[in-house]
């Protein structure tokens, strides 16, 4: 798991803009991976599980609960964006969650996140909003949007 943690942290370091404060530190990720209800997926630039010597282009970190799962983090190295890596990660999340018995999956994002188009493209729909949740530069606030997807509709 140490190699995978290194891969996650490498992608984390280049994928998240520091201005938003969304990246997790190594301790947060390693502690979360010790919990039995946390799952992760890595992918290479082709959207597949990376072999030992492959480049890791992206990852997801998921929290599972009975009947549902939540996407905690998704990140794609900017060098590999626009190549289907994010979509492959989301599709993998959907398959894995369904196989683990989830009927609903969720994610939350800041309202100005450009990934919204990607989330909607695989079937996520907005189901809630937290006003002024994220702190933005200049001490302004941005809403958080919760998205959900009913996996039973896809089966």
Image (cartoon, rainbow, N blue to C red):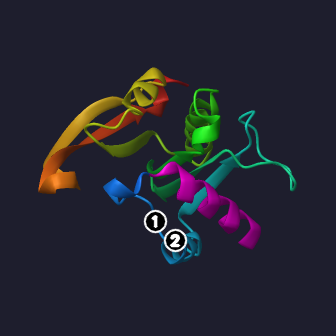
Name the dominant secondary structure of the magenta segment.
helix
Residue 133 in the image: x percent, y percent?
A: 18, 53
Q: Which residue is drawn at 72% across and 49% down?
A: 56
Residue 132 in view in this figure: no
Sequence-wise first label, 1 or 2: 1
Q: Quadrant of residue 18?
A: bottom left
Q: Residue at x 46, y 27 (%)?
A: 118
Q: How far apart are marks 1 and 2 (CA)?
A: 10 Å
In the displayed structure, 4 sits above or below 103; it is below
**Residue stretch in magenta:** 1-16
57 or 100, nearer to the observer: 57
Residue at the spot 69% in from the left edge and 60% down from the top edge: 7
Q: Decide whether residue 85 is among the magenta residues.
A: no
| Farthest residue, direction front | 138
The residue pinned by badge 2 equals 32
- For the point 66% across and 67% down, which residue is it? 5
86 relative position to 22: left or right: right
Task: Please tell me the numbered disc located at residue 24.
Answer: 1
């Amino acid at each position: 798991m140490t190699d995978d943690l290194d891969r996650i942290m490498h992608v984390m370091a280049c994928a998240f803009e520091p201005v938003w404060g969304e990246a997790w530190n190594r301790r947060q990720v390693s502690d979360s991976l010790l919990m039995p209800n946390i799952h992760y997926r890595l992918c290479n630039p082709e959207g597949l599980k990376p072999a030992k010597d492959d480049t890791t282009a992206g990852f997801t970190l998921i929290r599972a609960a009975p009947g549902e799962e939540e996407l905690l983090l998704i990140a794609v190295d900017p060098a590999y964006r626009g190549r289907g890596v994010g979509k492959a990660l989301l599709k993998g999340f959907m398959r894995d969650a369904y196989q683990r018995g989830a009927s609903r999956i969720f994610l939350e994002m800041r309202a100005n996140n450009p990934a919204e188009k990607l989330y909607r493209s695989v079937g996520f729909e907005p189901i809630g909003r937290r006003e002024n949740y994220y702190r933005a530069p200049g001490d302004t606030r941005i809403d958080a949007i919760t998205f959900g997807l009913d996996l039973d509709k896809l089966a």
